[in-house]
Image (tube, rainbow, N blue to C red):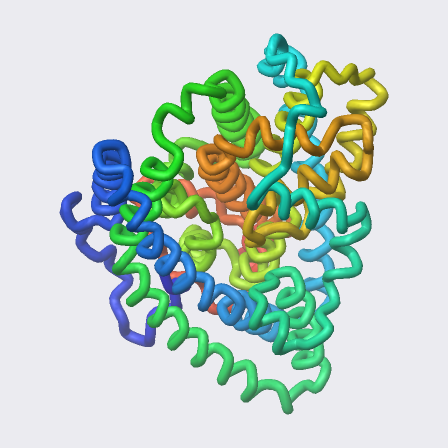
């Protein structure tokens, strides 16, 4: 979904007629997911054969992710009135991300200790043999250290960052590029205008690709069920149920509580983003809706520079779902292998996971790599234990992606409110009608409006 643009002079601001439910994207995506589940269940071989359908759609979306992130960040920085505002937004975003990650890890840690899903498994670490993708993920994780994401933020080549799809490196380059554009003054104005025009073209390409979202969701879901089978869901049902339940608690209670402080209803926000959630559910990738999410948040009235900085950065630094997964999985493996963990050792795990959870967004097997990196760094829990949960990881990845999406949506609204530029009345109005409103062309301070009116 393209970012909502300001109307041309004389253009009507009347709300466009709502499409019938059977023409809405979410209806067709939901139908495709159900058809994919049935196909994979009834005809497993056909479901497995449909893997290229899902992966091709996700690849088509990822093709546009790095250019959209770059163009959005540069346009956002180029459109602000001062670089100080950019730095302030970035710092506030990172502070909130760190707090959110800590809370998500703590919630997962408390849940796994209370319900103890791994108790009674009694798996012997020596009997666990790493193979296939799991072995590669552990190898990649062992090659990382707690400071790995800090050194990887600087690309060896600007072009390479785009080619590899490394969002974190693209963000770094885009921020530098945007700051330089502001620093050169009038020379950079036509470049910013050109970037805005190029963004319109890229978002139009995205619109064409999103027409195939139901087909991509069908292929991805059919492959998942056909490959792993519905029986896989029940083999480790306690862990799966605890993860989904904990994530739901985090979204409704924790994130809902944060939004309640802003006088915004979490359920209305989730309904507003229902199409994005269904696409993520079908594709198991939160990246597939990153551009649409930015457009939807701008439609709520969040300023473009805040959306452009907070959302892409959040995809690397604000992974609430992945954080819950890390704490649950690490302690589950300890419980399943009868590895005793003291409170101090669990707090040590939490401290390491605060760092290993960063910068892994968009990487295949990111959850496993971060988990392996954590276990390898701490050394108290056998890394081979990840084989216990490898079979169900695909089913847990959907929940990770959904929770990450919810967390980044809330984070953007919080940062906008922190900057005093969130019109809560407008947000609630849009959430009630479900129709985005044109975004103001110039940034303004909501709290300053009464003073300006009196003047």
Q: Check the picture and name the quadrant holding the N terminus.
A: bottom left
- Residue 360 drawn at (x, y percent): 63, 50
Can residue 418 be seen here? The reply is yes
Residue at point 67% right, 37% down? 371
- Residue 140 drawn at (x, y percent): 69, 50
- Residue 78 drawn at (x, y percent): 60, 75
Q: Identify which residue, 228 or 247, lies in the foreground.
A: 228
Number of marks in the image?
0
Residue 106 against residue 259 in the figure, above or below: above
Residue 288 against residue 389 in the figure, above or below: below
Quadrant of residue 130 within the rendered picture: top right
Residue at point 49% right, 68% down? 68
| Left or right of 209, for residue 343 | right
Residue at point 43% right, 54% down? 288
Residue 172 against residue 395 in the figure, above or below: below
| Left or right of 29, for residue 428 | right
Q: Check the picture and name the quadrant holding the C terminus.
A: bottom right
Quadrant of residue 113 within the rendered picture: top right
Residue at point 49% right, 32% down? 391
| Left or right of 382, for residue 9 | left
Q: Identify which residue, 191 or 31, lies in the foreground.
A: 31
Can residue 451 be seen here? The reply is no
Q: Identify which residue, 57 or 253, lies in the foreground.
A: 57
In this view, which residue lies farthest toward the right? 344
């Amino acid at each position: 979904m393209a970012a909502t643009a300001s109307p041309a002079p004389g253009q009507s601001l009347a709300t466009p007629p709502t499409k019938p439910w059977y023409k809405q994207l979410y209806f067709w995506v939901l139908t495709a997911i159900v058809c994919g589940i049935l196909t994979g269940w009834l005809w497993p071989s056909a479901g497995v054969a449909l893997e290229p359908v899902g992966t091709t759609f996700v690849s088509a979306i990822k093709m546009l992710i790095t250019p959209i992130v770059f163009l959005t960040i540069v346009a956002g920085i180029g459109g602000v009135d001062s670089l100080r505002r950019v730095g302030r937004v970035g710092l506030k975003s990172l502070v909130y991300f760190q707090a959110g990650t800590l809370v998500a890890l703590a919630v997962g840690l408390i849940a796994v200790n209370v319900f103890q899903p791994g108790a009674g498994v009694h798996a012997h670490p020596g009997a666990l043999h790493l193979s296939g993708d799991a072995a590669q993920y552990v190898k990649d994780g062992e090659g990382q250290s707690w400071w790995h994401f800090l050194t990887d933020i600087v690309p060896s080549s600007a072009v390479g960052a785009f080619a590899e799809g490394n969002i974190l490196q693209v963000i770094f380059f885009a921020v530098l590029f945007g700051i330089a554009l502001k620093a050169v003054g009038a020379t950079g104005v036509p470049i910013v205008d050109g970037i805005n025009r190029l963004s319109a073209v890229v978002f139009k390409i995205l619109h064409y690709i999103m027409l195939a979202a139901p087909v991509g969701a069908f292929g991805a879901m059919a492959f998942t069920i056909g490959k792993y089978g519905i029986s896989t869901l029940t083999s480790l049902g306690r862990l799966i149920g605890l993860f989904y339940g904990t994530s739901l608690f985090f979204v409704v209670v924790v994130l809902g509580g944060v939004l309640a402080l802003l006088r915004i209803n979490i359920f209305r926000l989730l309904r507003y983003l229902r199409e994005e959630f269904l696409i993520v559910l079908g594709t198991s990738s939160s990246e597939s809706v990153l551009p649409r999410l930015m457009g939807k948040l701008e439609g709520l009235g969040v300023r473009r520079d805040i959306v452009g900085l907070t959302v892409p950065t959040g995809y690397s630094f604000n992974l609430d779902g992945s954080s819950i997964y890390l704490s649950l999985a690490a302690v589950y493996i300890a419980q399943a292998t009868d590895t005793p963990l003291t409170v101090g050792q669990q707090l040590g795990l939490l401290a390491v996971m605060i760092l290993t959870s960063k910068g892994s967004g968009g990487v295949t097997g990111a959850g496993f790599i971060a988990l392996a990196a954590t276990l390898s760094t701490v050394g108290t829990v056998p890394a081979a234990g990840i084989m216990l949960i490898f079979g169900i990881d695909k089913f847990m990845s959907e929940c990770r992606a959904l929770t990450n999406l919810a967390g980044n949506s809330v984070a953007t609204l919080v940062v906008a409110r922190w900057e005093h530029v969130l019109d809560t009345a407008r947000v609630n109005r849009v959430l009630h009608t479900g129709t985005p409103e044109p975004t103001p062309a110039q940034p303004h301070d909501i709290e300053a409006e009464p003073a300006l009116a009196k003047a």
